[in-house]
Every structure is written in structure tokens, then in C-alpha cells.
Amino acid sequence: MKIFVCRSVTFDSPSSWRKDVCLVDERGYVNSQVSNFPVQFQGVVRRWFEFWFACKVLWQTSQNSSIAVGRYGLWVPILAKLLHLKRHVVLTDVEWPKVKRGIFNRIAALGSSALCCFTSEEIGRYSFQYRIPKNKFKLLHAPFDLRNICDSFDDGYIFAGGYQARDWDTLLAALDGLPYKAKIFTRESLNPQSDNITIIHSNAENYYRAMAHASCVVVPILPEPMRITGMMTWTTAMAMGKTVIVSEPLGAPDYMEHGVSGFVVDYTDVDSLKNCIKLVMGDQGLRNRVGLEAKKRAWNQSSPDVFKSTVLNLLTIQ
């Protein structure tokens, strides 16, 4: 049996995959094609190249192939089903942000052997919205990227960052009046009222280096109707031994135990977030204990090796 893995969330060195796995960079292929077109046409063009990518993958695979695809590969199970091709397809990166009828998503799901979701909450939402049986889903923790892991230090400041559904208003309100320095990495234009808060627009290397030097990492999340965001940020921080505070009460419990390997507060709850920051920043011993437990948990459930092992197990189940 041949195994094809089309990567969208496993960015680290391909050498750690099994030798019988053929790796295909779906993100690189689709994005490189789309980038050649004007921005106003890229939405339509992307859909075309995702379709063409699926055609290429199915053409290259044999009847006894198992195929793992990410968010750019939804056409693979659909075409395999329509063409009556014998393919064992696993969707490894299910992220459907919008509430819609979802016929395309439903057909892709029903044509797949399994769908991997990063939180239990998303499994429930997607199953209900798109009428997909829950037994089709597999909880697969979002993996951190080994290239982003840096040596950890405690330099006395708060780190926050990210680009999807971040609740900066709640974070700024929680930081107001606190004596701690904070570094916020974002593309947005924010106007903090405190001189202790620095807004930084920078590259990924500086982003993760600053995360590694922080005393704690805050991930303020806005609720979305379907997907859960922020996992890549908090899994990376946990893997570096950081104490993480997340305002994502529905998704974060799959990754951390409150007060043991991280802290979870409710959406938009300024007072709870402020009190949690004060608790963590005021107790280095607490940070050390929670950070150590966070690191253990991240490497046990969110490492790239765990991700790969789970995907390969799903691909070999017929």
C-alpha cells in the first residue's frame, strides 16, 4: 500500500516521516500558483488550483493508496467518490470558519475515511451543521512547528500575539492599570493607553523569540460560530514551557487543565483575565510549575511526532 501525505499543518523536516510515505506540499503548490494572479481574482483562482491539485494527486496514486490531505485537499475525496476510485482518504486539517449550507464540505466528509479536528467543540459544531456522523471525526491536537521552538527565558513581560480572531480590546482593558510590561505582536493598529504596552509588527522569527523570553503568554480569543482559533499559538508556547492564559473556554480545555498546565478564562471577561494575569505574573514559582506541566503536556499530545503517528495510524486502518 502506498501512502501519500499532502501537508498543510506539518511544516517541520520531512525526514522524520516514514520512508514509505510520499510527501506532497499542498500549501506550497496552491499558494505558488495563486500568487501569480491579481488579488481580486485569487479567490476564484484558488478554487481552481485546489481542484487541479486533487486531480494531480489522484492521477499519481494507485488504487491501493492511502492519502492524507489538509485544508487545500477537499476535492480529493469528492473526486475519488465521484469517479469510484478506491482511495483511503483522511482529512487532517478541517477548518471551516463560516456557517453555511456546506454541501461541498459534507460531500468531502462523507467521501473520507476520517476527519481530524483540533478540538472537541469543533467536532460537535461541524457534525451538527453539516449532518456528518460524529464517528467520522477524530480529535487530533494541533501540532506545533519544531522550527519555532526556542530556548525559554523569563524576562518579566507578558507576550500576546496572533492574527486570527484576537480579542485585543479585552486584553488591553485587562492590562490597564497593571504594572507589567507587555509585548503585543499583531498586524492591527492598536492604541494602548499605557506606556508599558508595546505594539510590534514583525516577522515570525522575532515573534517566537519574544514568546520564548516572556514570563507568560496570553491568547485572547474572540468566539466564532464554527472554528476555534489560537491553538498553534498556545501549543507552541506550552512546548517552550510557558504559562499560557487563554480566553477560549470551549477549545482550550482539550489542551490544558486550568491551574495545572495553563489557565482558561471566558470570552471577553476583562476581570477574570486581569486577575489571572496578576496571579501568574506575581508568582514565579507558579509560573515554573505550570510551565513545566504545560511543556510535558504539549510534547505528549501536540508534538509533530504524535501528529504524524496518529495520521499514519488512520491511513493504515482499512
Image (cartoon, rainbow, N blue to C red):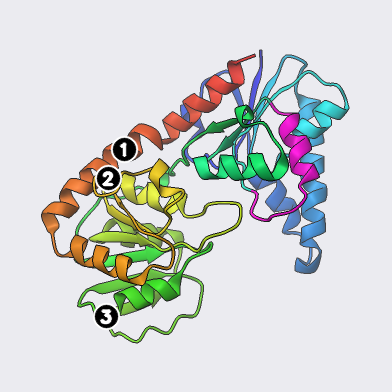
Up/down of 59 relative to 125, above or below: above
What residue span does the magenta drawing correspond to? 96-112
Badge 2: residue crowd in 10 Å (few <14, some 14–19, many ≥20): many
Q: Is residue 148 visible?
A: no
- Sequence-wise first label, 1 or 3: 3
Residue 100 falls within the magenta-colored stretch? yes
Give the residue drawn at x 81%, y 55%: 45
Image spot of residue 229 (x, y percent): 51, 54
Q: Which residue, given by chain and number where applicable, does mark 2 sit on?
A: 261
Up/down of 288 relative to 84, above or below: below
Q: Which residue, given by chain and number where applicable, does mark 3 sit on?
A: 196
Residue 234 falls within the magenta-colored stretch? no
* Disc 1/disc 2 C-alpha distance (Å): 7 Å
Left/right of residue 262 with respect to residue 35 in the rendered view: left
* Disc 1/disc 3 C-alpha distance (Å): 32 Å
Q: Which residue, given by chain and number where applicable, does mark 1 sit on?
A: 297
Q: SS of the residue at dot 2?
A: loop
Q: Is residue 286 visible?
A: yes
- Residue type, mark 2 in image: Ser
Task: Point out the frontmost of discs 1 and 2.
Answer: 2
| Residue 275 badge | none
Task: Specify the quadrant that holds the C terminus.
Answer: top right
Quarter residue 245 falls in: bottom left
Q: Are marks 3 and 2 in contact (CB under 8 Å)?
A: no
Task: Point out the frontmost of discs 1 and 3.
Answer: 1
